[in-house]
Image (cartoon, rainbow, N blue to C red):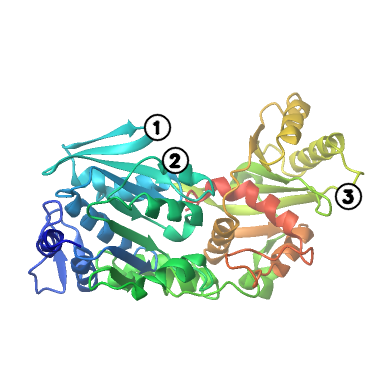
Amino acid sequence: MSGRDNTKRMTSEKQMGGHAVGGENRENVKNGGGYVFGKKHREYMKRAYRSTVNVAEGAVRAGKTIDNVFVFAALLESSPDRLHLATGSTLGNAKLNIGECNGLGLEHIFEGRCAWTRYRGNEALRVNTKAGERIVIFSGGKNSDSFKRIRGNSYGMWIATEINLHSDSFIKEAFNRQLAARDRRVFWDLNPSSPNHFIYSDYIDKFPTVEGEWYYNYAHFTIHDNPVIEEELVRQIVCQYDRESVWYRRDILGERCAAEGLIYRKFADDPASFTVEMVDPDSIEFVTVGVDFGGNRSKTTFVATAMLRGEGGYGGVVILAEHAVAGGKGEIDSGRINRELSAFLRRIRSVWQNVRIKYIFADSEAQYLINGLRRHLSEEFAGTVVMDSAKRPIADRIAFVTSLMSAGKFRIHKDCVLLRDGLSGAVWDEKSAGDKRLDNFTSDIDILDAMEYSIERYMGKIK
C-alpha cells in the first residue's frame, strides 16, 4: 500500500458519503440520515476504512450489510478506480440488499447524483462522486457459471452480501478482477454456515495469516448488537424459529454449526400436534399442487396444499392430500402421470368442494413432462395454471417449513401418511460440507420435494 493510500484510509473514516460517524462517545450514534449505529458496529466501520478485506458475520437483522454499504459509499467518493462490483447470491438479492437496503442503500446515499443503467450488458449504478463518475456493476454469484458475467472488467472495490451463497468459481474470478485495482477493497457479509463450508477453509480462516497491519478486519454480530431493532421485534423474530433447529443457532445466536441429526425434530417428536382431521373449505384461499417427477429409484409424487386466508397475507398452510404413482422403472410413462394427476385433482374437488385449484408447480427439470401435463389438463382443469417449480435451494425450503412449524402455521391432514413419515424421518447429510439432506432412500425425499414445490413461491407471504 502506498503512503498516499494509507493517508487516505486514515482520514476517510471521518466521513461516510456525507454521514459523520467518528468522534462520538455515546454508546449508540445516529448518522446524518437518522440511522443508529451501535458501538460495536462503529468500531468495525472505523477499521474498515483502513482495511483491505472486511468480513461481517453473524445473526440475521444484525446490521452487517448496512455497515459495509456505508463504508463502501464513503470510499467511493474518492476512489481512484472507476469500476466497482456489488454482488449477492442473485442479481435481485444484490440490488435489494446493497442498492436498496431498506432505504439505506447506495441508491439512497447517492440520491440525486446516481442512476441505474447498463454497462457492457450488466445492470449498474452510475454515481457522480467528488472524484468523478464511478460505476458499480451489480451481479449474482451463486451459479457455477456466474463468473462469466463479470469477466473483462477490472474492479477497485467489491462488496458482497451473503458471500457464503456465492460459488467458489465466482469468488476466485472476482478476486482476479481486482488485481489491477489502485485501491483494492473487499466487503463481505454472511450469516454463519457449517464450519466445513469452503468459505471458511479457503478464505475467511486464511485471511488473518496475510501479512499487513490493515489487511484484514473481522467482526461478529448478533441481533442484540443492532440498536435499531426494538426488543419486541427481536422477540417476534425469535419466535419464528424452532429453538432446536440449526437455523436458530445460526440466524439468532450467530453460531457456526453443522446441520446434523433430524431436520424436523419438532415435528418428529410430536406429529399429532401438526395433524388435523378436517379443514373448513371456507378457510381456504386456494389450493396449489406440487409435482416431483421420479427417476430410476425415486417416485413421482403429488402434494396438494391449501393456502389459508389471512390478514395482510396468507394465514398458513394445510397439506390436504398426497399421492405417489406406484410402479418401478419402465412401468411409468407420461400418460400414466397425466391420468393419475387428473384423478388426484378430482379427488380434491370432491372432498373440498368449491375450492379453487389455482396452480400446479412441477419439477422444472422435466419440461417435456410439464408440457404434457398442460395439454392433458387444459380442458377439464382449464382454470388451473401449470408452472415450473421455483426450485429454490433445498436449505431455503427447509428453513421456510421449519419457520412455519414454529409459528403454528403448518398442518397436515391425517391421511397424509407419506408426508408424515417423510418429515419424521428426514435427516441431514452429515458428510456434506453444505446443508443437504440425506438422500439414500432411507427416507421419502420425493414427497418432501413435492410438498416444498407447492409452497416455496409463498416465502415471505404468510403472515
Amino acid under disc 1: Gly
Amino acid under disc 3: Ala
Q: Position of residue 196 (x, y in %)?
A: 54, 72
Q: What's the CA distance linking mark 3 and mark 2?
A: 44 Å
The residue located at (34%, 65%) in the rendering is 233
Say whether residue 133 is left or right of residue 306.
Answer: left
Secondary structure under tag 2 reads helix
Identify which residue, 55 or 334, lies in the foreground. Answer: 55
Q: Position of residue 429 (x, y in %)?
A: 66, 69
Identify which residue, 252 or 406, lies in the foreground. Answer: 252
Secondary structure under tag 1 reads loop
Identify which residue, 321 or 160, lies in the foreground. Answer: 160
Q: What's the CA distance linking mark 2 and mark 1?
A: 8 Å
The residue located at (78%, 61%) in the rendering is 417
Q: Which mark is residue 121?
A: 1
**Proximity of marks 2 and 1: CB atoms separated by less than 8 Å:** yes
